[in-house]
Every structure is written in C-alpha cells, then in structure tokens.
C-alpha cells in the first residue's frame, strides 16, 4: 500500500484510510507548542525537525491554526503563510493540518463570512487537512469553512468537541455526527476533539464504538491531551474500537498539557496487535534527537505549574489554555487561588452556564467568569461582553439547557427578558468591504500589500501592521535560533553568533562591548560580518519624566503655516524682531537665528498677531523648539 | 636650544603644520583652549600651552598667543587658516614682539585683507575685475548707493563684508526687497564677526567656476605659481570639494590665469604662500576675486600634483631662505581631489553634529591617499568649533583613476557617531556630471538628487539591530 502524501487527492487519501489495517498518527506539533510552550516553538526548530518528520510517515503534521497564527505574528515575528511555505519546501510529502475555530477562524470572535472564505482560500494553498470545530458544536458556525475547504479540494475534518457529564451521551454525539454529515456529506474525516483530555479510556472507547456502530465507514481521528497523564489509555481504547488516526507529538518536547509521546503510542498499541501504518520509528526517534538540545531555550515558556493535573476531569480546562491560564494567574498574583478557581468555581460556572465545551472561545469565557467571580467576591457581578453575547445566544444556541434566570438577571438587570427578546439570537455579521481594508492596509504600510498580508491583517489588524513594520526594521528574524531569538540575560562579550539569513547567506555577529554615557544612552558594539557596527539605545524612560518630542522638518514647516514658529535647525537666537501683541504680515521677519556663522531670518508664514514669545535672545535652540506663536487672522 | 615654532591654530591644520615643523627638525608648540583638551594636535606637538577656556575667544586673542610664544621662547608663529591668520594686527604684533610671522608682512595682510583696497591695487595693475562698489557709507546713504549700483548692473548682487573672507560675510541678494532686508543684518553680522561693519557690493557672475592659483614668493620678490585649483563645489560659499589642477581648462587659458596670479602677487609685493582667487564664467572670462594671504585648507591637492611641500616652504621662506626652484621646475602631474569630511548632516542643511562621539573611526589608506585629520575613535567632536573632521585627498594619474580611488576611499571610510558628509560624497563621486568634470558653483543647487540617499540597511544589519536590542534589554521584547 502506498503512503499517504501530498500527491494524493482527498478521495485517494480517504480510500487509503478506509483500506488501512492499523492506524495512522498525526504529529500534533502545533498543539504541543500551544499547550506546553505558549505557542512559542519557533519555525527555526520546526525546520530543524522537518526532514525527519517528513520521513516519519505521519498522516499529517498539525502545524498551524489555533492560536498559533496570532502568536506567529505577535511573538514569533514570522509570517504564518511563509512559515508553511518554508516547511513545505523541507517536507514535500507530509500533509499539513490546521485547527480552525469555525466562524472564529484563528481568533476569538466571529468574523464576517467573506473574511472567513477569503482566509480559508489563502490558507488552503498550504493546508491539506482542515480540522474545524465550534465550541457550542453548532454546525452552522462551521459551514462556510466546510464549503471553502471542499472547493479548494482539501480534506474536511469536522470535529465533535467532547466533554463529560450527564448530558454528554453517546446518543447526543452520534446525533451530532449525523447533523454534520448532513452538511458535509460522508467524504470527511471525523475528529473527536478531546481538547481537555477528559473521560476515561473506557468512555472514549465507548464513544468511538457508538459512532462506528452508527457509521461503520466513517474515518475517526481521535485528538486528545495528556493533562491527566492518561491519554495513551484513551488513544489505545479509541484505536481498539475503530479510530483510524490518533494525535501524539515528539517526545523531546513533551510536557504535561499537550499530546502524549508518539513513540509510547506506537509501543503500547504494538502489543495489542495494532500497527502504526507507514511509520518509520527511526525517523520518529531521530526527530527528537535532532531538536532535543533546543528545548532548554523554551523553558521560559513552560507553564508556571508543572506536572500532570488529573484534576482536569473536574475543571475541564483545555490543554491549549493551561499555559496561558496559569501565566495569567501568576502575573495576576492569584496562583494561590487556583485550587479554589479550578476545583470549585470553574466547574460550578460550567454547570450554571450550560455544561457545553470548554474550548476557545468558550473556555476563555468560563475562565474569565470564574476568575472574576472569585477575585471580585461577587458572582457574575462584572460580566464580560463575551459572556453577555453568550447568554444572548449570539454564538449559538445552548446545546443542553439555558443558564438560570437569576444569572440573566444578574448580568442584564431586571429588564433581562426584554433585552433577551430584543437582542437575542445568533450574531449576524455583515460582510466587510475587503477592498477598503486593502486600501487601509496599503496606506498603513506605504505600499500595496500581498493577498496573504491582507488576510493576516484581516485576522488581527493592529498586530499584523506591527509585525510588517517589525520585519522592515529587523528583517526576517525567523532565521534566528531560539538560542539567539529567545536569549535572556544578554550575550557574553566576545560571543559569536552564526546564522543564515532567509536567502541562505551565512552571517557572523560577534558581541562587542557595551557603553553607557552620562546621559544614560547605551552604545552596543557588534562586529557584523567582520564590520563593526554600533547601536545606540536611548535611556529607559522613567515614569513621569517628560518625553522630549522631536519634530521632523515637515512637521516644523506645517506648524509654521499655523503660526506656531519653531526653530528649523539648531542655532542661537540672535534677535527676536517682534513683540507680543504686535501684528505681523506674511513674510515679516520675526526672529534671527544664527548657526555656523550664518544669521538666518525667520519669517512669518501667516498674517496675524504675536500671542506668545517662547525663545529668548542668546538661547540655544534645537530643531523643533518653540520660538513664538502667532494667532493667524481669520480669513 | 632647538628652534621652536608655535602653531597658533587647532585641529587638522595644526597637525599639518606641526608635522612640517618636526620634519625640519624644529620643535612644535601647540596652543589649546579647554574644549580642545582631547584634540590630537596637543598630543603630537612637542609642547602644548593652554591659553584659556575659549571657546574661540582665546585662539583669537593676540595677546595670549604672543605671550604663549614668548613664554616658550618660540622663534616663529604659524597662524594656519582662520582665527588670526589674516589679521594684520596679529602679524604686526608678531613683528613688534620680534617673532617671525609665517606669512606675508602685516601691511600686505592689511591691504589685501581689505577687499576694497585690494580691488583698487589689482585694478591699477590691470587685473580683470568684477564690477563692484567701494565701501558703502553707513546708514541710508549706503543703501542708496547700493540701489544705484543695482540699477546699473542688475540683480543678483553679492553683499560682502569688507573684512570677511573664506566665504564668511557674503550674501547673495536677488532683488530690492532682499537688499533692504539683508543690508542691516549684514552690517551687524560683519561687526560681530570681524569687528568692522564695512560692506560693499559686487555684481554676481552667474554660475561661475571658482578657480584659484597657489603662489609662492620669496623675500627677493621671486614669485612662482603651483598651478590652478578648482573649488567650485561649494555650499553657502564654503568649499566642500577641491581639485587640482582645474579640470577642463584649456592649457593656454590656465597659463594666462597663472601668469595673472603672479602679476597680482607682484602688484601686492607679495611674500610667502598665497592664493589668488578668480571667478571664471562660461565664456572663459575670468575676474579677480581676492588674494588669501594664508595657507588654504585645500593646499593638499596642490602638494599632491606638484610634490612641493607648501608648509615646509612657507616656514623656510619665513626664516629667510630663498626659493630654490624656478617656475620651470614646477611640474603638474596627474589629478588630485580633496573632500572635506565634516561632522554635518547634509540632509539637514549641513547642520553640524558637534557634541557627538566617534564610536568608530576607521580610515582608508593605500596608494595615492592622504588624510589630514585630528580625530580618533572615542573623540568627542567639540560643539564650539567648525565641523571639519578630516580632509581626504587622493591622487591619480588620470581623472577617472582619481575619482575611482576617491570612491574606494569613501567606501572604506567608517565613521560612526555623528552624521558626516561621507554618504553625500559617495553620491557625488558617482554622479555623471562630476565624473565628467562638469561642474560650477551652481552644482549643488542643480544636483539636488545628491541629497537623496538613505542608508540601505542590509539584512545582516537589520538582524544585528535586533540582536543588539535583545542584548541590551536582556530579553527579546518582541517575543515576550
């Protein structure tokens, strides 16, 4: 049998999956990065791993989507499209997989339909398998994505989000699968998305079995997290009951909240007589050996609490949100309140709000509400906009039951029924004027953006522009290894940094001395490809100090036209030719500045009355310093 | 005891003179004001005398300089350029103190320093002159006379301080409104700068070339020239680039101009080294401008093409030696170009960048390259003096070779800290008109594209900047 590669079309891939005797593995690198390293694993590391990952024979590499698109531009300073393009060059065979949040795409709130479609079209140029979900399991929220993926000739992998509790029956989930297939048809892979790593192996085995009973031909892809340390048990049960693909990740970087180690999955299932199809175990091992020495640089991004958390079965936080939640608790100084939040308030809020699925953006709503309830002391006293939208049904109908009236009353006040009546229902978002957005971006960039830049901009407008500006200033910094890009505490004097730029040209930078002058300006000397270069840094602004504003020539000229006359260059005032209250005409000399032996008259560009004289004769002025002000005559 | 010569100047020219003094096996005495305490001219001199806190006032203080010379027992004083170099009172004070002034006698300095007297002497000697007035009377009468001159010769005009020189105290007047506006400022400025508010006006020769002739004369009146220099590339009437010999000048015209320069020198009973400046219009008419009675900044280009050490010759002539060579012995070979590398921002109207520290100073070298500078890595450019850091002079056998050598030197020059004129010069040496030797005094005005340069950052530099920031902030704030 042939290995599944990018050379196959979706029908061939599905056909191969159907005929398989054994199971396939998805290397869930993105989810591992998100769950255990706050999404910070750099492209540099993924490129190091690329050849052996490509040789390992995975069904797919999950390498984009989730929060990673945002973090790519915000914290990794890499273009999310370029990242995929470069990985594709190193990994010609392996399918690339994404995690898409339906209407929320890779963000936290619903996007307009035309933005969703454009985004999927652009990403589908690189992404072969589209795992799509909705935190309310509300199928219409995923429909636009399904349609665009199918149009692009890529593989749809709709998800049923999984959770536990009395409402979460096999019956419910089988019905959900039916609902999905009514929209997508049966040329899909179905994902059981166990983002919290919830339930026992038995529970997962039963669920897979129930779905397989109802849809024997359906390919099931089990996705889980190892937060409680037991995901290999669940994976085993899933495969034994008929799941065809399972998620795991490279052991060199395994933490606590992401997927479990690939190799352990393979070894466990082997004893049950289940073969990991196409897997090259040597290549799996080689990947971890290749990137193992990179791990220490990422330690700074590991969760504040380390160790498995079997209590996830109580609080149900998804693995992908563990790191960021714990970080927020650490930064907010309420780590000590975590037991109360995680073990009491969060499960309570979850039940009160309808026991749906704790996954983005719902998990953030639950978390924020629970934290607020504990820290504020008043439950639901300070509801977020997202909680209000949720209660109004903007994100979809409650799957099991609606929250109690008292919560509505607490959040919306006594008139809550009218408000719900008037504003309730699914959020209708108008299409965006994408051409207008393109013009806006062009204006902010000062050049015509590419289609991909536009798509990135449409996801996160300000962060995208910041990123594009970062690239202009600092170049393509994804070439830097984590030992440089993520270095803390500075470099050692004489340390030599070697790297290749994006064109493949090798560079050598040697760290030279650092000097601080009396004004607090720091000068850093670097030898860049054997040429000395210096970099000057202004002193750190102390809180409360007045920031000296420097004006450009154009700004100074512009102010002069409004009667605000400032020094155009540095020089001494040798004459103030007018007095306050005096009327001046256009072209009248108002002052004389002297610099470099030359006296230069300063003339008024407006007719009006001198209202304020700021400069004194003999005073040394810097460009932009105030000389005097003229109140222009009204036309 | 060894003969001591005091150098009454600072910066690069002080070093240039100190070198000549030491090569003649004399001892060089430097003077300095407080802001110059880091200047290299102090370090290489055999002895240095602090003359006050300045700034500038003590270098201009005749008493203090003479006292310093007497205290160390100096036989002679070389004034360099600027400061006291063309001040007849200083030359006279030297003469009265029994110290040799390395330059012409005080009366020659005086009459040539007064532009009006100089013009009269030259006119009498039959030297071609630009039409102009005598000193204008004070007040409205002066303005009226200026207006009358303008009616006859038309605008534009040059309004000049009689006691000015070296591009100082000169203003171009385009119309009557400007004449009214500038007239009183010019007088005030002249008074402040030269302690003499006399001004006069001259007709403007449109877009001339600035051509000057270096002359040397010994006490017997024997006068030779060292060929021409073209100093047309100027900003605000101050030279930026100087070339020897003047390029694209027909040999017989060059010879005629040089002979006129000798005639002018003789008419003024000139002694020691001097420069006769002419304006050359597009029809090859040339007009006398002035005689500079001092060593010029740009003397280096002449030294490069003649092989004659002008400063050494100046000292020997002042000490009573005769000129040991004749006109026929002076051979002009090849081409030389000098660029004044200033701590200035060409993109901001050449505003000086004083106060900044040279964190990197790496200079070029090699065949045909000469550097006359005074700064070094770690040196802070004083804010109170002019902004010249170093003169880069190159020699080549052909014009093209010289230009390419210049380009190579500019590419190899690394100065970090203050902005400099280097990026502007890099543009200049690649500009086709310059490369073809086609330029006159309007060159900068008509080639504004020279100011459009942006330092293109290489990918390595951009990444280095990020690395510097990660280093400085102790973390990557863009990844935090």
Image: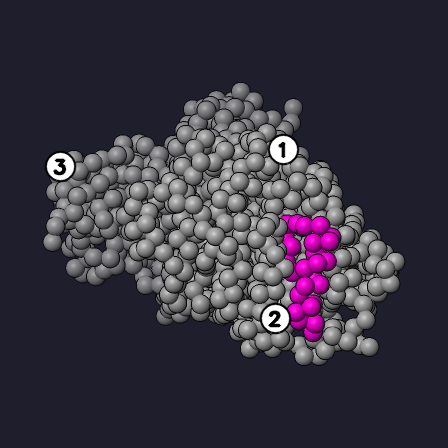
Q: Is residue A618 left or right of residue A271?
A: left
| Disc 2/disc 1 C-alpha distance (Å) | 81 Å
Q: Is residue A350 left or right of residue A611?
A: right
What is the crowding at mark 3: few (fewer than 14 residues within 10 Å), some, or many (at least 20)? some
Per the image, the residue denoted by label 1 is: B44
Same chain under badges 2 and 1? The reply is no
Q: Secondary structure at mark 1?
A: helix
Identify the mark nearer the N-term, 2 or 3. Answer: 2
Same chain under badges 3 and 1? The reply is no
Per the image, the residue denoted by label 3 is: A581
Please give the chain letter of the residue carrying mark 3: A
Q: Nearer the viewer, mark 2 or mark 1?
A: 2
Name which residue lies at 59% across and 66% down.
A177
Highlighted range, magenta = A192-218
Q: Position of residue B412 (x, y in %)?
A: 63, 54
Q: Are marks 2 and 3 in contact (CB under 8 Å)?
A: no
Name which residue lies at 45% across and 51% down.
A402
Per the image, the residue denoted by label 2 is: A156
Q: Quadrant of residue B25?
A: top right
Q: Is residue A165 visible to the viewer in this orientation of the structure?
A: yes
């Amino acid at each position: 049998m042939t290995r599944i590669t990018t050379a196959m079309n979706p029908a061939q891939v599905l056909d191969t999956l159907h005929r398989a005797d054994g199971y396939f593995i998805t290397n869930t690198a993105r989810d591992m990065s998100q769950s255990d390293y706050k999404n910070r694993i750099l492209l540099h590391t993924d490129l190091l791993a690329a050849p052996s990952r490509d040789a390992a024979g995975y069904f797919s590499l999950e390498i984009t989507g989730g929060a990673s698109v945002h973090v790519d531009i915000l914290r990794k300073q890499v273009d999310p499209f370029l990242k995929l393009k470069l990985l594709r060059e190193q990994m010609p065979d392996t399918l690339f997989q994404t995690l898409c949040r339906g209407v929320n795409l890779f963000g936290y709130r619903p996007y307009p339909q035309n933005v969703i479609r454009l985004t999927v079209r652009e990403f589908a140029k690189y992404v072969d398998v589209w795992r799509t979900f909705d935190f309310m399991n509300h199928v219409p929220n995923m429909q636009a994505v399904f349609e665009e993926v199918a149009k692009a000739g890529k593989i749809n992998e709709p998800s049923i989000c999984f959770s536990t509790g009395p409402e979460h029956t096999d019956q419910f989930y089988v019905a959900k699968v039916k609902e999905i297939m009514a929209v997508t048809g049966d040329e899909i892979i179905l994902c059981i998305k166990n983002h919290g790593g919830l339930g026992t192996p038995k529970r997962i085995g039963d669920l897979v079995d129930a779905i397989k009973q109802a849809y024997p031909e359906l390919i099931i892809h089990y996705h889980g997290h190892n937060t409680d340390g037991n995901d290999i048990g669940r994976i085993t049960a899933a495969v034994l009951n008929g799941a065809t693909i399972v998620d795991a990740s490279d052991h060199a970087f395994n933490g606590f909240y992401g997927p479990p180690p690939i190799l352990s999955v393979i070894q466990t299932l082997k004893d049950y007589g289940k073969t990991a199809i196409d897997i090259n175990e040597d290549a799996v091992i080689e990947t971890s050996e290749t990137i193992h020495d990179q791990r220490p640089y990422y330690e700074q991004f590991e969760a504040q609490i380390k160790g498995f958390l079997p209590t996830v079965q109580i609080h149900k936080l998804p693995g992908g949100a563990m790191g960021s939640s714990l970080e927020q608790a650490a930064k907010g100084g309420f780590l000590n309140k975590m037991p109360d939040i995680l073990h009491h308030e969060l499960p309570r809020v979850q039940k009160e709000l309808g026991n749906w699925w704790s996954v983005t953006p719902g998990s953030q709503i639950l978390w924020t509400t629970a934290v607020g309830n504990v820290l504020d002391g008043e439950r639901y006293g300070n509801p977020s906009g997202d909680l209000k939208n949720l209660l109004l049904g903007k994100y979809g109908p409650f799957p099991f039951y609606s929250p109690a009236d008292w919560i509505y009353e607490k959040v919306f006040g006594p008139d809550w029924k009218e408000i719900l009546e008037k504003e309730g229902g699914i959020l209708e978002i108008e299409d965006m004027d994408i051409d207008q957005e393109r013009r806006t971006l062009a204006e902010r960039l000062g050049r015509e953006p590419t289609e991909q830049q536009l798509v990135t901009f449409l996801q996160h407008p300000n962060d995208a522009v910041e990123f594009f500006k970062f690239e202009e200033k600092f170049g393509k910094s994804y070439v830097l290894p984590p030992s440089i890009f993520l270095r803390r505490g500075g470099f050692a004097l004489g340390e030599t940094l070697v790297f290749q730029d994006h064109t493949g040209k090798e560079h050598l930078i040697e760290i030279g001395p650092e000097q601080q002058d009396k004004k607090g300006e720091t000068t850093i000397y670097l030898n860049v490809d054997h040429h000395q270069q210096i970099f000057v840094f202004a002193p750190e602004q102390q809180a409360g100090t007045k920031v000296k504003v420097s004006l450009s020539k154009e700004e100074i000229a512009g102010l002069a036209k409004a009667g605000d006359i400032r020094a155009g260059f540095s020089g001494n005032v040798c004459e103030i030719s007018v007095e306050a209250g005096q009327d001046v005409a256009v072209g009248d000399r108002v002052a004389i500045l002297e610099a470099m032996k030359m006296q230069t008259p300063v003339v008024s560009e407006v007719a009006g009355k001198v209202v304020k004289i700021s400069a004194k004769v003999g005073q040394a002025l810097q460009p932009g310093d105030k000389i005097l002000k003229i109140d222009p005559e009204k036309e | 005891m060894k003969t001591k010569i005091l150098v009454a100047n600072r910066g690069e020219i002080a070093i240039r003179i100190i070198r000549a003094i030491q090569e003649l096996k004399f001892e060089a005495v430097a003077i300095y004001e407080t802001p110059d305490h880091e200047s290299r001219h102090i370090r290489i001199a055999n002895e240095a005398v602090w003359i006050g806190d300045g700034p500038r006032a003590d270098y201009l203080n005749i008493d203090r300089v003479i006292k310093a010379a007497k205290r160390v027992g100096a036989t002679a004083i070389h004034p360099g350029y600027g400061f006291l170099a063309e001040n007849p009172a200083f030359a006279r004070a030297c003469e009265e103190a029994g110290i040799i002034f390395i330059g012409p006698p005080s009366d020659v300095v005086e009459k040539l320093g007064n532009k009006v007297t100089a013009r009269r002497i030259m006119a009498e000697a039959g030297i071609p002159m630009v039409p102009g007035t005598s000193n204008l009377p004070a007040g409205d009468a002066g303005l009226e006379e200026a207006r009358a001159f303008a009616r006859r010769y038309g605008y534009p005009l040059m309004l000049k301080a009689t006691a000015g020189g070296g591009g100082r105290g000169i203003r171009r007047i385009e119309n009557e409104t400007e004449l009214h506006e500038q007239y009183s400022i010019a007088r005030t400025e002249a008074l402040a700068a030269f302690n003499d508010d006399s001004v006069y006006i001259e007709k403007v020769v449109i877009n001339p070339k600035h051509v000057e002739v270096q002359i040397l004369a010994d006490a017997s009146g024997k006068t030779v020239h060292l060929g021409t220099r073209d100093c047309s590339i100027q900003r605000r009437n101050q030279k930026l680039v100087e070339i020897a010999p003047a390029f694209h000048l027909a040999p017989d015209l060059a010879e005629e101009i040089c002979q006129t320069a000798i005639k002018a020198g003789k008419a003024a009973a000139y002694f020691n080294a001097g420069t006769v400046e002419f304006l050359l219009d597009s029809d090859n008419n040339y007009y006398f401008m002035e005689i500079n009675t001092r060593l010029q900044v740009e003397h280096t280009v002449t030294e490069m093409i003649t092989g004659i050490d002008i400063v050494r010759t100046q000292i020997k002539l002042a000490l009573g030696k005769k000129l040991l060579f004749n006109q026929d012995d002076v051979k002009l070979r090849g081409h030389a170009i000098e660029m004044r590398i200033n701590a200035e921002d060409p993109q901001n109207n050449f505003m000086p960048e004083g106060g900044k520290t040279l964190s990197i100073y790496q200079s070029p070298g090699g065949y045909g390259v000469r550097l006359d500078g005074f700064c070094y890595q770690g040196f802070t450019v004083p804010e109170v003096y002019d902004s010249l850091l170093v003169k880069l002079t190159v020699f080549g056998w052909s014009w093209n070779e010289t230009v390419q050598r210049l380009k190579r030197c500019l590419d190899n020059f690394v100065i970090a800290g203050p902005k400099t004129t280097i990026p502007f010069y890099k543009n200049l040496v690649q500009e086709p008109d310059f490369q073809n030797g086609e330029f006159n005094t309007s060159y900068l005005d008509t080639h504004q594209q020279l100011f459009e340069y942006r330092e293109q950052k290489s990918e390595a530099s951009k990444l280095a900047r990020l690395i510097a920031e990660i280093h400085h902030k102790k973390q990557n704030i863009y990844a935090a």
